[in-house]
Amino acid sequence: MAFTAGGRDCSDARKWASKEASRNRRHETQSQLLDLGGNLVTGLILNSQQQKQQPAAPAGPSEAELALMKQQQELELLKLQLQL
């Protein structure tokens, strides 16, 4: 069944409009995917830069840990002395 407007067949115009709408939707989807990909790359770059800026963790124990170990050793020594 052909749609008519003022005695003219509108099927060609409707097909063209349908194809154009489909093309616009694809373009919008592609744009959104490109934006998403760009955001992911930007996030990875920023994260990498932040990790490079953070100072590396010290390889050995901190001063507080050393002080705690010293106290524990002193306690163990005292225990041994009490047992003698």
Image (cartoon, rainbow, N blue to C red):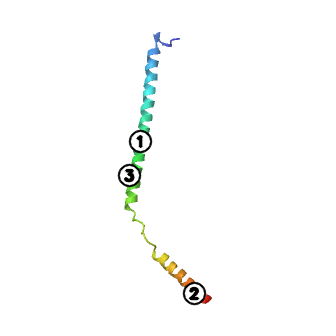
Q: In which quarter of the image is residue 78?
A: bottom right
Residue 78 circle label: 2
State yes or no: discs 2 and 3 in contact (Cβ < 8 Å): no
Cα–Cα gap, marks 2 and 3 = 55 Å
Q: What amino acid does circle 2 point to? A: Leu
User: What x and y, as percent, mark residue 42?
Assistant: 39, 49
Q: Name the residue under label 1.
A: 35
Residue 19 lies, in percent from the top left, at: 44, 23
* Kind of residue sitting beneath label 3: Ile
Mark 2 and mark 3 lie on one chain; the one further toward the N terminus is 3
Q: Which of marks 2 and 1 is in front?
A: 2
Quick one: 70 or 48, which is closer to the camera? 70
Disc 3 vs disc 1: which is toward the camera? 3
Q: Which amino acid type corresponds to the residue marked 1 in the rendered image?
A: Asp
Q: Dot 2: within a 10 Å radius of its alpha carbon, few (fewer than 14), some, or many (20 or more) residues?
A: few
The residue labelled by disc 3 is 45
Label 2 vs 1, first from the N-terminus:
1
Of 33 and 25, which appears nearest the observer?
33
Q: Which of marks 3 and 1 is nearer the N terminus?
A: 1
Left or right: 4 with respect to 81? left
Q: Where is residue 12 in the image (x, y as percent from the top left)?
A: 44, 15
- Separation of marks 3 and 1 at Cα, in angstroms: 15 Å
Q: Could you classify mark 1 by the number of other residues whose Cα lies within 10 Å: few (under 14), some (14-19), or many (20 or more)?
A: few
Does residue 51 sit above or below 36 in this rendering? below
What residue occupies the far top of the structure in this picture?
Answer: 7
Whether residue 10 can be seen here:
no
Residue 72 appears in the picture as rendered: yes
The quadrant of the rendering that contains the C terminus is bottom right
Tell me if mark 3 has few (under 14), some (14-19) or many (20+) residues whose alpha carbon lies within 10 angstroms of its own.
few
In the depicted structure, whether residue 40 falls above or below residue 63: above
- Which element type, helix, strand or loop, lies under badge 3? helix
